[in-house]
Image (spheres, rainbow, N blue to C red):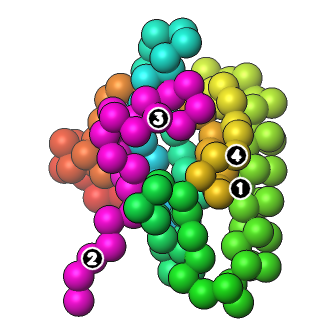
Amino acid sequence: MSKEKNGLRAGAEISHYQVIRELGAGSFGITYRARDLERGFDVAIKEYLPREIARRSDTDDVVLKSAEQDRFYQWGMDRFVTEAQILAQFRHPNIVKVLNYFHANQTAYFVMEYQAGLDLDRVIKKLDQPM
């Protein structure tokens, strides 16, 4: 069975952001490193794309694998946007700031400050300490 490639390609533009590369993917979405073309700095963009029920089309739109999943997809996207709205209200040095959220490609995105560094798995491996 071939693995679907759901991520946006490097160079793809969504709103005024240009994708640099995929940072990671999970069951409900993909996170990218991107460039804010208006402000000239890098950001992280989280995309709602639940891989069990949706996929990327050739035009970069997110499409459902089955029309019967539309209600569940919309419900999940509403929760995703609500998460972005709530996170955008936080101002704390240990929480990455949400800068923007929007709809495009038949899905939703939220934009966060890009924080370079190691992810938690790498930090733990580097310390050689079980969690």
Place residue 76 in its image quadrant. Answer: bottom right
Q: Which residue carries the number 1 mark?
A: 80
Q: Nearer the viewer, mark 1 or mark 3?
A: 3
Vertical position of residue 88 compared to residue 70: above or below: above
Residue picked out by circle 3:
13
Alpha carbon distance from label 2 to label 4:
26 Å
Asked which secondary structure carries label 4, the reply is: strand
Marked residue nearer the N-terminal end (4 or 3):
3
Q: Are marks 1 and 4 in contact (CB under 8 Å)?
A: no
Q: Look at 50% across and 20% down and name the residue there.
A: 36
Q: Which mark is residue 3?
A: 2
Q: Nearer the viewer, mark 3 or mark 2?
A: 3
Residue range corresponding to the magenta coloring: 1-25
Please name whichever residue, 4 or 43, is drawn nearer the observer in this view of the structure.
Answer: 4
Q: Residues within 10 Å of mark 3 (few under 14, many from 20)?
A: some
**Amino acid bearing label 3:** Glu
- Category of crowding for the residue at label 2, using alpha-carbon neighbours closer than 10 angstroms: few (below 14), some (14–19), many (at least 20): few
First in sequence, mark 2 or 4: give its number: 2
Q: Which residue is mark 4?
A: 103
User: As drawn, which residue projects farthest toward the top?
Assistant: 39
Amino acid, disc 1 = Phe
The x and y percentages for residue 67 are 67, 85
Judged by depth in the image, the label closer to the viewer, 1 or 4, is 4
Q: Secondary structure at mark 3?
A: strand
Q: Are marks 2 and 4 in contact (CB under 8 Å)?
A: no
Front: mark 2 or 1: 2
Estimate the spatial distance between the alpha carbons at disc 1 and disc 4, rounded to whole Å. 11 Å
